[in-house]
Image (cartoon, rainbow, N blue to C red):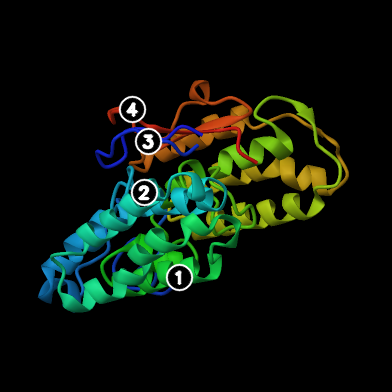
Amino acid sequence: MRLTGLRGAAVVSATLLLAGCGAGAPGGPAGDGASDGTAATSPSSAADPALAAACTDFWGDPDYTAPLSRIVLDRAATAPEAGPSDPFFYSMTGDDVEETFAGAGEGAQQRSAALAEWFRTEPERGAEADVDAFRAAWEDVATLCREQSAAAQWALGPGPEHTKPSALVCADVFDTPGTLTHFGNANVLTSNMFKLVGLSPRAVPAGHEEELRATSELLAAEAAAADSVDVRDALAQVRAPFEDALAGDDWSGGLRDPLGRLGEACEAAGYAAPGVGEMDDSSAVVGANPDRQDPTVQEGLS
């Protein structure tokens, strides 16, 4: 794996939902068009703009381009393997979390401290790193930010159908590491899917029925949540090879065309999705906004 250009850190060694408020967020009115992903201002965010700013910085609303939350997921997933060899690299992530919430008040600082501390203490334990403690700290930051961020709301649990900002759906499909999904690794969803049904046509590997089923269910949940009809329809096409495989078809036509259609729908929803030409069967671009410098690349992890 190659990590570059994240929050200005030097290159160092170390080789993803809840009812809320506002249009386009859980609990808001359903819509068939693309959402800009912006949750309505809640009383708490109006009263505490510093917390709202910190939550926006951490979760990435409304465009979800390279937010700290995605970096946090990536590094938590790589920590068990790479943490003991370079604990300072992971400690810097703790510093980033702390810095993000530094101006958000004492309560927010205390709530986010456990996540920062996890990166300072657990990665060096390698395979013994406490993943449950990471999940608890992650969810506490999501709870802290749930009134300010649609991404935080949906990190906690699913909301009503057709209320998840489609830009967030697209980010979860194309760019968010599978640390807390059934894959449990730093790969983004597309890269994990390639190992099952391929970007290009391929035989579906035997013995992966549970992964196929769980992935199909994940895609179905994202499609049900998305507030854009076009994104929902495109996700159904992405899901089709998994459904076919579960029905006994051991040959997949691949995801190149379905992901191309999803990318177009995501662009219309305001999310800069990676082009199919930027992918291959073992890698996917994270944070693939074409205007962004030094994107992160996840390559061939399993």
Question: Residue at image x 29%, y 50%?
Answer: 36
Name the mark nearer the viewer: 3 or 4: 3
Mark 3 to mark 2 CA distance (whole Å)? 9 Å
Residue 12 in the image: x percent, y percent?
Answer: 37, 36
User: Mark 4, residues whose alpha carbon is within 10 Å: few (<14), some, or many (≥20)?
Assistant: few
Answer with left or right where residue 241 lies relative to residue 221: right
Mark 4 to mark 2 CA distance (whole Å)? 30 Å
Q: In the picture, residue 218 is in which quadrant?
A: bottom right
Q: Which amino acid does label 1 sit on?
A: Leu
Per the image, the residue denoted by label 3 is 12
Q: Earlier in the sequence, mark 4 or mark 2?
A: 2
Q: Examine the rendering and report whether any part of residue 59 can be seen.
A: yes
Q: Which of marks 4 and 1 is nearer the N terminus?
A: 1
Secondary element type, mark 3: loop
Residue 120 in the image: x percent, y percent?
Answer: 37, 60
Q: Which of marks 2 and 1 is nearer the N terminus?
A: 2
Answer with left or right where residue 69 lies relative to residue 281: left
Q: Are the residues flagged by discs 3 and 4 in contact, CB closer than 8 Å?
A: no
Q: In the picture, residue 40 is in which quadrant?
A: bottom left
Per the image, the residue denoted by label 1 is 156
